[in-house]
Amino acid sequence: MNRLTIRRPDDWHVHLRDGAMLASVAPATARQFGRAIVMPNLSPPVTTAAAAAAYRTRILAAVPEGVSFMPLMTCYLVDHIDPEELAQGHGEGIFTAAKLYPAHATTGSAHGVTNVAHIYPALERMQAIGMPLLIHGEVTDNHVDIFDREAVFIERTLKGIVRDFPELRIVFEHITTAEAVDFVDAAGPNIAATITPQHLHINRNAMFAGGLRPHAYCLPVAKREKHRLALRKAATSGSGKYFLGTDSAPHAQSAKESACGCAGIYNAPFALESYLAVFEEEGAIDRFEGFASLNGPAFYRLPLNEGTVTLVREDHVVPDALEAGGQPIIPFHAGETLHWRMVE
Ligand SMILES: NC(=O)N[C@@H](CC(=O)O)C(=O)O
Ligand SMILES: [Zn+2]
Ligand SMILES: [Zn+2]
């Protein structure tokens, strides 16, 4: 098989940033994906429908002429957020979903939720109107080892949310552990998960391969090999609970290669090629379209995209560096050879 055409896919988790960075990275996502769930962790965060509508306009201005791409906006949940603002923004078609960042869990989460009890009125309303809750699932307790923070979040927080809001539609974002896969598999049809390309390709050794490797660092941090294998099995299983979410998170090279480097991997330019490599290695190319193009819309209750994308078997080396916002940026797979290339 040397050519694969699938229905146009979507990216259900991406960071497009703002300003000059947005102008540089939006075309890469818009080229491969028909729609994307855009994360709201700007500075200041996107907490109102007015801010989201203005951000959506800036995103659309960054999409090249002739490319059809629809940004799906999210609301950044803060303590005591007004359920009415959420419901109204959702009703007006501005907010597709709302995002829970535990305060200080990751990049741009300083204004996040300090205790989920503070957003219970919002969750109640979201459950009632069918608005999805997207979760960065890590505890922030410094006494918990960083490699355990996702698994502990399931026990301490996520199970409580699901118990108290059994009908709430939840996407457990960028899952990284076998525990998360087990949780999602055992949960009802209202619980799904996104999986990134990096968590399918690398385990935690990648951060320490011959020296410290900041470009392999993202949050949640990559885990042991057994977890990577569990994620590959889940992504390629054919289960409708798992779908594509790149978590493409651009940071300039200088911000990554630092005494305190930023978390985030920029994978947008070759995201489909990266995922397809995994599906091929797992003997599951026939399940790629479900993961990339069908499962997400089904969960979000949105129509499938019109149109297709085509990838061909063709070796190419990912550039060592790209440019974004006027600065060098190091893409995922920099310097590596990928065996598929998206052509149209
Ligand atoms: N994934 C990351 O490591 N970083 C993301 C934030 C996030 O998705 O947690 C970012 O905004 O840079
Ligand atoms: Zn996150
Ligand atoms: Zn993210």
Image (cartoon, rainbow, N blue to C red):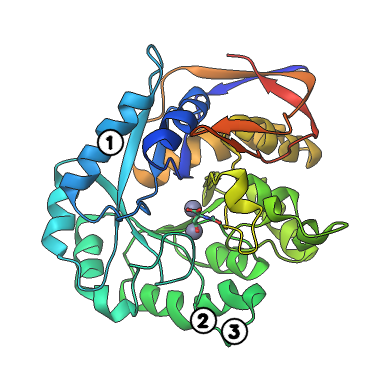
- Residue 137 vs 45, above or below: the answer is below
Q: Which residue is mark 2?
A: 155
Please identify, in this view, whether the residue under mark 2 or under mark 3 is nearer the observer. Answer: 3
As drawn, the label of residue 56 is: 1
Q: Which residue is mark 3?
A: 144
Q: Residue shown at 33%/72% (left/top)?
A: 113
Q: Dot 1: few (<14), some (14–19), or many (≥20) neighbours within 10 Å?
A: some
Left or right of 280: which side holds 47?
Answer: left
State the image coordinates of residue 107 (x, y, percent, origin top left).
48, 60
State the image coordinates of residue 39 (x, y, percent, origin top left).
39, 49
C-alpha distance separating marks 1 and 3: 37 Å
Q: Is residue 87 visible?
A: yes
Secondary element at tag 2 = helix
Which amino acid, by three-letter code, is at mark 3? Val
Q: Quadrant of the N terminus?
A: top right
State the image coordinates of residue 179 (x, y, percent, origin top left).
63, 71
Please identify, in this view, whether the residue under mark 1 or under mark 2 is nearer the observer. Answer: 1
C-alpha distance separating marks 1 and 2: 35 Å
